[in-house]
Amino acid sequence: MNLSDFTPSVYFSPQELTAIVLSLKVAATATAFSLPLAVFVAYALARWRFPGHAALNAFIHLPLVMPPVVTGFALLLLLGRKTPLGHFLAEYFGVVFAFRWTGAALAAAVMSFPLMIRPIRLSFESIDERLALASRSLGADPLWTFFVVTLPLAAPGVIVGSILGFAKALGEFGATITFVSNIPGETQTIPSAIYSFTQTPDGDADALRLAAVSATIAVAALVVSEILQKRADATRAGK
């Protein structure tokens, strides 16, 4: 193996471009659909006390400690084509997850959800509850107070959670390949394409290009989220 084998090319092959575009599509879809639920769950964990609070918190963070392959296998058992729920969704709503890009988006959403929750929850917990009480005392209903007072104050945490969730979804591999396999043009994202290239003779340079793309996006996401977090901390500190 020579150093020239790793010389990056300016151009991407059609397979690489397809994997990059599909990864962005999967990550954007996973983030867009899971963000509203993440905001609701984070607010519930931060503000409400109810039976099962600890159990819900543990369940949400389960994908962080469980092997991704197990999560993908669980999704396959739940939403596979021949399972009752998978058959019901396909028959009555035309929604198929297994071995489709929609399944890749679902697997990515499940794996990235805990990372989205944490900064959003911390942001809600840092907001002075007296602001919401003041709004309520002026006659505002709870929903209006949430969308006009609480949610804007938590915006930095929501943005950071979205960025981290998008980055995690973009790099998801274990659950995705278990649930939807590695089908070029349909479910082959950047990580699964890298895996395929590493199993192919002379595929190291292709794998390196996609690894560089993935690493660049991940580093950019971390830098942006760190900057936003520091700005939010400075704002709360009144600097």
Image (spheres, rainbow, N blue to C red):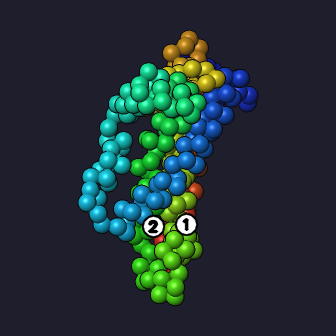
Question: SS for tag 1?
Answer: helix
Are discs 1 and 2 less than 8 Å apart at CB? yes
Check disc 2 and give the amino acid type: Ser
Task: Please tell me which residue lies in front, 154 or 8.
Answer: 154
* Residue for badge 1: 155
Q: Vertical placement of 231 versus 128: above or below?
A: above
Quarter of the figure with residue 80: top left
Seen as rendered, the residue at the extreme top is 201
Is residue 64 rendered to the left or right of residue 79?
left
Residue in view at x 58 percent, y 30 percent: 94
Across and down, in percent, residue 116 comes to 46, 53
| Residue furthest right as drawn | 11
Look at mark 2 in the image and give the residue it sits on. Answer: 123
The correct choice, above or below, for 57 with respect to 26 in the image is below
Residue 208 locus on image (x, y percent): 58, 28
Picture residue at 36% right of the left edge, 43% below the top = 64
